Amino acid sequence: MRWILVILAILVLILVAIALAGAMLPREHTVTRSIFLKQTPETVWATVTDHANEPKDLRSRGCYELGLALHYFTDITQPMHASNYTAKDWPLELHSDYESYGMTEQARFVATTWAGPTSGDASAQLLAAAHASKPRWPTLKTAITNAYAARGCGKFSSYWTDHTNCWEGDASVDAQLGVELVASQQATASYLFAIDLR
Ligand SMILES: [Zn+2]
């Protein structure tokens, strides 16, 4: 009996150590890149603007970079991303559950109107999309919290892991998903307009 308790205690200690180590990691994460070049600024500028002698695969690389830019852009239109609410936040997996649900429902929320592009270059578009997206998480969280309560699931914030049956298909959650998806399409259209692919 005693050795079972010892093993259990060790297991609990390991879990606590993992949780403590995780809690000490920074939540914010910033990445920058720099490069030291031997050439003068004039030579570097002449090289990067020498379009006549660009590598032949530049167009395909450009397509890859456009794909990457659109990935990041559409990512920030997901309010949980703009609010730094991750899949590790409580209740666990709500973040990924919500995204999976969005994938299955997105055909219901196709934007049919667009007021046209907003002003600003690509960076300004990205920033504006992030600012518009961030406050949608508290609204969505309230809708999910209410759905949990309405379905008899109790207090949303007391769960360790998300239970999709407590909110999926809820009218208010769906309405908010619709707002987010339509806004995402319109912001992405504005971004594409701003980077001017002609
Ligand atoms: Zn995500």
Image: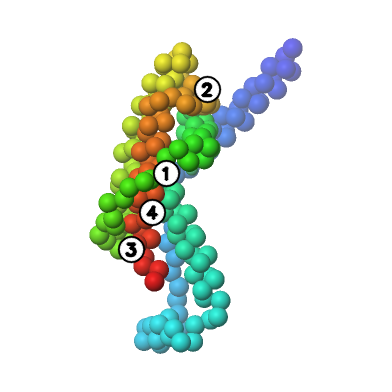
Name the residue that disc number 4 marks: 188
Tell me the number on the disc at residue 176.
none
Label 2 vs 4, first from the N-terminus: 2
In the image: residue 86, left or right of residue 189: right
Distance from disc 1 to disc 3, alpha carbons, whole Å, reads 21 Å
Q: Dot 2 corresponds to which residue? A: 165
* Label 1: how many Cα within 10 Å (few below 14, some 14–19, many 20+): few
Q: Residue at 53% across / 37% down in the picture? A: 104
Q: Residue 150 falls in which quadrant of the image?
A: top left
Q: Distance between the residues labelled 2 and 1?
A: 25 Å
Residue 53 higher or lower than 132, as above or below: below
Q: Measuring from the top left, give residue 105's x and y in whole percent.
A: 49, 36
Which residue is farthest front? 112
Q: Which amino acid does label 2 sit on?
A: Asn
Give the labeled residue for mark 1: 110
Marks 4/3 in contact by CB < 8 Å: the verdict is no
**Percent x, y for residue 170?**
43, 24
